Image (cartoon, grey):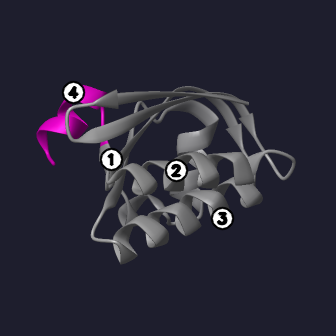
Amino acid sequence: MTIESIKIEKAVLLKVSGRMDAENADEFRIACEAPLEEGVRHVIADLKELRYVSSMGLRAFLTAAQSLQARSGSLSLCGLSGVPRQVFEMTNLLPLFAVFETSQEALAAL
């Protein structure tokens, strides 16, 4: 998995690609929490290049979202499709997140 972090306006955009599993899921959580130290409270995860997410990956999404919400922030998802979207839907986790087609839509909703 690779994560590219880009600061945009009042949020940080994390472009996530590859496979998120037990070996690297914690990297996502850390990447989500890092902007808090710089005063940024909102994270948009662009997942259009994410090909696989395991149960540990789902846990990383939930933990990051809870951490951001506890600090009056948010985690938005965009570009979620294919197998990762199916996993979110099958586990009934999709309603717990603000989900958008594009990062521009997610940014406009902040």
* Identity of the residue drawn at 69% across and 53% down: 57
- Determine if the magenta segment contains residue 52: no
Residue tagged 4: 104
Q: CA distance from mark 1 to mark 4?
A: 12 Å
Residue 99's disc number: 1
Q: Earlier in the sequence, mark 2 or mark 1?
A: 2
Label 3 Cα neighbours within 10 Å, binned few <14 / some 14-19 / many ≥20: some
Residue 59's disc number: 3
Q: CA distance from mark 3 to mark 1?
A: 17 Å
Q: Nearer the viewer, mark 3 or mark 1?
A: 3
Magenta-drawn segment: 100-110
Q: Earlier in the sequence, mark 1 or mark 4?
A: 1
Q: CA distance from mark 2 to mark 1?
A: 21 Å
Residue 60, horizontal then vertical, whole percent: 64, 59
* Identity of the residue drawn at 35% across and 71% down: 69
Q: Earlier in the sequence, mark 2 or mark 3?
A: 2
Judged left or right of residue 32, residue 79 is left
Q: Judge by depth and name the residue closer to the eye, 50 or 84.
A: 50
